Amino acid sequence: MMDLFSEVHGLYYQMIQDILQKAHKQPLTKQQVCGLLQEKGFQETFYNLAPRLLEETMDSYHLLIQHHKGYQSILDAEPITLMTHLEKMWLKSMLSDKRINLFFDSQDMASLETALEDTETLYDDDSIITVGQANDGDPFSDGLYREHFQKICYGITHKKLLQITYLNAKGVTKWSSYAPHRLEYSIKDDKFRLNAVQINQDKLLYFSKINVARILQVTIMEDATYPTDMDTFISSHKKKEPIEMVLTNERQGFERCFIHLSNYERNTEYDDETGTCRIKLYYYDVDEPELIILLLSYGPVLKVLGPPSFKAKMQERILRQKELFLHHNQWND
């Protein structure tokens, strides 16, 4: 049976690796080595490890060399974090994921595949079954989609403004400058969306969510200044009151709901007596129309408790659908 745990994740191993990394960059004094052991270890760690690291005896590890400047790593290069066989198998399985090439360039992918060519996969695609997923997910293997995705990732990590041209929900071409905030993935829709703030002349205008598949062009604005108050602006668009609801497990309600709401921040408590889950869902004003439709789709397995303003909008939606249904049937008669 494969070992689930490995010594490379143990505290002593991690501490010694940290010391070797620091001692590779510059020599450490005896006091610094002892300080690291006392800071990160258990009460007995200092007495167990200090002699093995600092003394030259038969029982020593011989990992540090002492000279006039202090203790230096015996290794020629900085130590790297080792991967267990189980972790390599997991990574090999991840390489078969249809979305993985979005996060690496072709050279990185080739290097990973070569490094893991003799490693078995931990699982295959058939091992995971996604329930209720849409059939019209994003074209993850498309070259232009991948180019847009990686430019967005660059903008997020390097805090660069992006000029984006895209098709809105009505099929109308739009373009503007955006400060990218993060990417979110919906398991239900099998799509990525960019969370960004629209900007005009250094002024923050709207918090928006753009489907990556609808983007026609992305240009990185290298010389533009990324706003410093992004987090404050985005937080101002977060609803003050979460949606509170009770969910039953009828018709696989738990599985359906938790998959479909996986891209939202939420707190969940399970009630053993009633067999229900009480959920608090946190969201932004831009999410509200989509959430109303989604929560109504669960039918009687989900009951929305509040806030009153959100409940009123759900009731209004139901009445509007009822009127449309009656009007349609009247014309059919």
Image (spheres, rainbow, N blue to C red):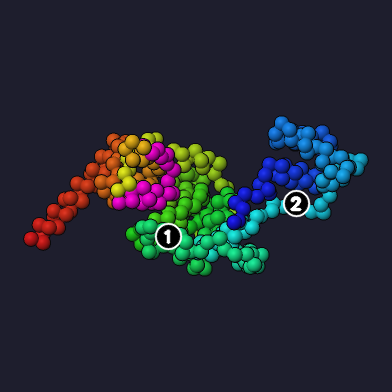
Q: Which residue does the image show at 46% across and 64% down from the upper left?
A: 126
Q: Is residue 310 visible in the rendered structure shown here?
A: no
Q: How much space separates mark 1 and mark 2, taking CA atoms?
A: 39 Å
Amino acid at dot 1: Ile
Query: Magenta region: which residues?
Result: 251-271
Give the labeled residue for mark 2.
Answer: 79
Q: Which residue does the image show at 38% across and 64% down from the upper left?
A: 136
Q: Nearer the viewer, residue 177 or 254?
A: 254
SS type, badge 1: loop
In which quarter of the view is residue 66 placed? top right
**Residue at far front of view:** 1
Q: Sequence order check: which comes first, mark 1 or mark 2?
A: 2
Q: Nearer the viewer, residue 90 or 29?
A: 90
Q: Residues within 10 Å of mark 2 (few under 14, many from 20)?
A: some
Residue 260 lies in the magenta stretch: yes
Give the labeled residue for mark 1.
Answer: 129
Comparing labels 1 and 2, the label whose residue is closer to the camera: 1
Image location (x, y in percent) of residue 42: 70, 34
Q: Residues within 10 Å of mark 1 (few under 14, many from 20)?
A: few
**Residue at far right of view:** 68
Position of the N terminus by quadrant: bottom right
**Residue at far left of view:** 333
Image location (x, y in percent) of residue 154: 58, 55
SS type, badge 2: loop
Q: Which residue does the image show at 62% across and 53% down from the upper left?
A: 3
Amino acid at dot 2: Pro
Residue 135 lies in the magenta stretch: no
In which quarter of the view is residue 315 placed? top left
Dot label at residue 224: none
Position of the C terminus by quadrant: bottom left
Image location (x, y in percent) of residue 168: 38, 58
